[in-house]
Image (cartoon, rainbow, N blue to C red):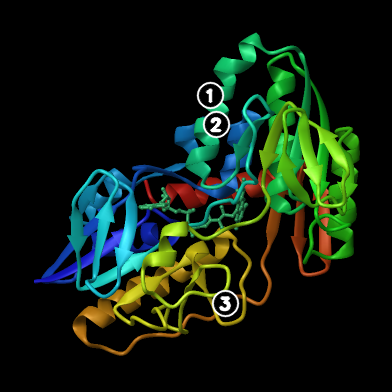
């Protein structure tokens, strides 16, 4: 019997479990370790934040998926991986060993040191942490003044979507948010075409969001945020979408990592240093850097499912080929969305209806 350990309820893991439920490979003992049995689908999270969906509507039920794939579910968090011993340590105590492992643990954020009594900071990654922070905010905001200085950090797609969504949520709750978006780059949506960037700026302007470019946040102080160049920004609430960071515990694993701490993989999604370990999605470093976006994890899913089964059976592995460009649908929390692919972009309510149907269809695959 071969032991396969799946770590993290990421998008690629969902596809592996779905396929294995239909045709489980023989003589494999499958274990899934994840702290969240209801795992959020990132595409719908801004919609949840804006109040358009219930949390459960945006989630894949991994307890159900694991049961159907005849996998043992361990509801815990990995805190260390020892590649030499092929085992992981769990937050709740104990270790789990394996012959083959899959890492699909997503990414996190690195926050500057915050002082007590400063603004409330909501990290956008991991998505489960965002939900917990927003729920805690709901309780705290009942005592909060109506006028709120809301500051988003990060001018990428997730930063723009979550800021517009949280603004909508606060408006619905009767607050009066004054919104600012801080971006380290001078422009928003780096890597997108000029038309998509203009449409995003239009959406921010319609929501009266002030954009401060070239603002590289270094400090979170008692009254707000401080930039490297000495500028400051008052804040009551900070939504942190300042880019994806690697989980710190990977640093002690012995796996080959890139400079940012993500697991280096080959074209078949295996670790460069330890080929019995597969890494997919945000936690993996492809030789040419890929955007940290869920669509890559989704597309890695079928290749992962095939390659893990092939590795266990001693068959040939397939190469993953990343898509050249991707359709991005950005929810602007006003009933509309921006659709962008390559240099082409357009916006409207039709784009939001399109996004909603794609996202619901994705979730439905795993029900
Ligand atoms: C607000 C927001 C909106 C976004 N919208 C989009 C979008 O529309 N389209 C898009 O393509 N991308 C989007 N992204 C990016 C997207 O969220 C990520 O790229 C994607 O979720 C990565 O998928 P993954 O499969 O690598 O891991 P995730 O989906 O992040 O899943 C990781 C899993 O691992 C688990 N895990 C983490 N640590 C441990 C541990 N130590 N032990 C065990 N389990 C662990 C987590 O609980 C989670 O279940 C968005 C990001 C944000 C922040």
Verify CB contact (< 8 Å) between mark 1 and mark 2. yes
| Separation of marks 1 and 2 at Cα, in angstroms | 5 Å
Q: Residue at x 83, y 68 (%)?
A: 343
Q: Residue at x 20, y 82 (%)?
A: 313
Name above or below for residue 126 compared with residue 84. above
Disc with the residue nearer the chain's start (3 vs 1)? 1
Q: How many badges with numbers are in the image?
A: 3
Q: Residue at x 29, y 46 (%)?
A: 91
Residue 20 seen from this side: yes
Residue 316 is marked as none
Front residue (pair 28, 116): 116
| Separation of marks 3 and 2 at Cα, in angstroms | 33 Å
| Residue 220 locus on image (x, y percent) | 71, 38
Instruction: Say which residue label 2 marks.
Output: 133
- Label 1's element? helix
Q: Looking at the image, which residue sits at the far top?
A: 143
**Residue 347 in the figure: left or right of residue 65:** right
Q: Quadrant of residue 115?
A: top right
| Residue 22 locus on image (x, y percent) | 25, 62
């Amino acid at each position: 019997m071969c032991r396969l350990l799946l770590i993290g309820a990421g998008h690629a893991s969902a596809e592996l479990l779905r396929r294995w439920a239909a045709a489980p490979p023989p003589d494999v003992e499958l274990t899934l370790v994840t702290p969240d049995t209801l795992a959020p689908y990132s595409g719908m999270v801004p919609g949840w934040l804006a109040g358009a969906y219930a949390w459960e509507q945006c989630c894949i039920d991994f307890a159900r998926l694991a049961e159907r794939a005849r996998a043992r579910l361990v509801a815990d968090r990995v805190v260390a991986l020892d590649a030499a011993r092929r085992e992981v340590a769990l937050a709740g105590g104990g270790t789990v060993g394996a012959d083959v492992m899959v890492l699909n643990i997503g990414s996190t954020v690195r926050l500057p040191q915050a002082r007590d009594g400063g603004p409330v900071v909501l990290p956008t990654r991991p998505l489960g942490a965002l939900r917990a922070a927003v729920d805690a905010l709901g309780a705290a905001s009942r005592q909060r003044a109506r006028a709120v200085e809301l500051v988003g950090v990060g001018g990428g797609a997730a930063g723009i979507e979550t800021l517009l969504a949280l603004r909508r949520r606060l408006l619905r709750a009767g607050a009066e948010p004054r919104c600012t978006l801080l971006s380290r780059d001078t422009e928003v949506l780096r890597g997108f075409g000029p038309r998509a960037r203009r449409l995003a700026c239009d959406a921010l302007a319609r929501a009266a969001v002030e954009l401060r470019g070239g603002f590289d946040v270094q400090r979170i102080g008692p009254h707000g945020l401080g930039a490297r160049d000495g500028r400051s920004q008052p804040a009551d609430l900070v939504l942190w979408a300042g880019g994806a960071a690697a989980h710190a515990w990977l640093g002690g694993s012995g796996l080959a990592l890139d400079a940012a701490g993500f697991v280096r993989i080959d074209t078949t999604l295996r670790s460069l240093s330890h080929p019995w370990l597969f890494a997919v999605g945000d936690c993996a470093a492809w030789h040419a850097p890929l955007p940290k976006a869920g669509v890559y994890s989704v597309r890695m899913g079928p290749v992962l499912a095939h390659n893990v089964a092939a590795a266990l059976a001693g068959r040939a592995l397939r190469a993953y080929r990343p898509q050249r460009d991707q359709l991005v649908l950005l929810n602007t929390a006003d009933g509309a969305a921006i659709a962008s692919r390559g240099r082409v972009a357009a916006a409207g309510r039709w784009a939001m209806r399109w996004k909603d149907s794609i996202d619901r269809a994705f979730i439905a695959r795993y029900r």
